Amino acid sequence: MVEVRVRAAAKINLHLGVGRLAADGYHPLVTVFQAVGLYDDVTVRDADAWRLDVTVADHIDAGGVPGEGNIVQLAARVLCAERAEAVSVEVAKAIPVAGGMGGGSADGAAALVALDRLWDLRTPDEELLAHAATLGSDVSFSLVGGTAVGTGRGEVLTSVADDATWWWVVVPSRTGLSTPAVYRHWDELFPAAADRPTGAEAVLAALATGRPSVLARALHNDLQPAAFDLRPDLKALIRLGESLGALKGIVSGSGPTCAFLAADAQGARLLADALRSAGHADAMACPAPVHGATVMTA
Ligand code: C5P
């Protein structure tokens, strides 16, 4: 194999229950991930020297993408520590950087799958998932996609049957929010938080109905107050989206991307148009759930 391209999707958290900071430096979570149709592509090729090129879509701040220590390089290291071959890597980013949509995690998952194929390692799925968890809390979900409950740090996954097609309008932000900073602020806001996060029963029951109006009422993100504090403009954005026809708006993960649930594809297109007309030029309609990391060329 001389070149492999793998596509991985963004995520939103339909439920994000956060428990008090644990001794390992992470917060115990109960979350429901859903993969949405907004993608990064990672292409790997045999090369004489290690090389990383990142190209970004118009709505992305290229300055936020790490060069040294990029998650793609870390993926290469965990996948095959002893391997000496250099690879050239191209990352084409459409998922917002530091946006709360798991963009870095998507790149890590795509890189694991691409390098596994390039080097013909045939790593068993369980091993790939274990590698993913070492790269970041959301990387495991980026591998599997669809809809899943995440516990632990978010890396312990149980797939959820989710047969409907949901339509979201995603509004990225030109400046990102640091995930650790949002969690730190949440610690300050809620020093007496319970050890155990709130459960996802309401969202799981709502998903089973297949009805967007029911899911809208169940969406929940414990990090939202912390994200609003750090970025007060997000509150106004959510109000705007809801006034323009969204069933419900939420901050995606640790933000600052906001996600608006629409009734159907047509509703999502109209809402994205309305948000763009209102000055949010990067508003995009996306279906969900979509697949995890997928080989596009072999
Ligand atoms: O696992 P990942 O590298 O994506 O996490 C980034 C940071 O987000 C962690 O260093 C931690 O500060 C915070 N985090 C957390 N609890 C989680 C997941 C992430 O506190 N469950």
Image: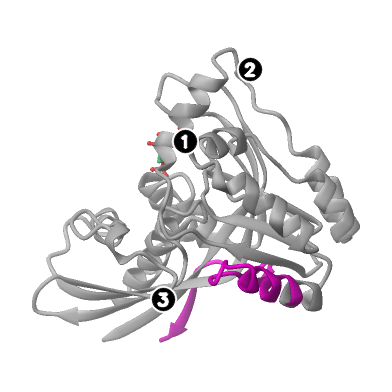
Residue 170 image offset from top left, x and y in percent? 61, 64
Residue 164 image offset from top left, x and y in percent? 81, 67
Magenta part of the chain:
270-298
Residue 40 image offset from top left, x and y in percent? 44, 71
N-term mark: 3 or 2: 3
**What amino acid type should be assigned to the residue bearing mark 1?**
Val
For label 3, the residue is: 57
Quadrant containing ligand 1 reads top left
For label 1, the residue is: 182
N-term mark: 2 or 1: 1
Q: Quadrant of the N terminus?
A: bottom left
Marks 3/2: CA–CA distance: 40 Å
| The label number, if any, that marks residue 194 in the structure image | 2
SS assignment at label 2: loop
Q: Is residue 177 left or right of residue 285?
A: left
Residues at marks 1 and 3 touching, judged by CB atoms closer than 8 Å: no
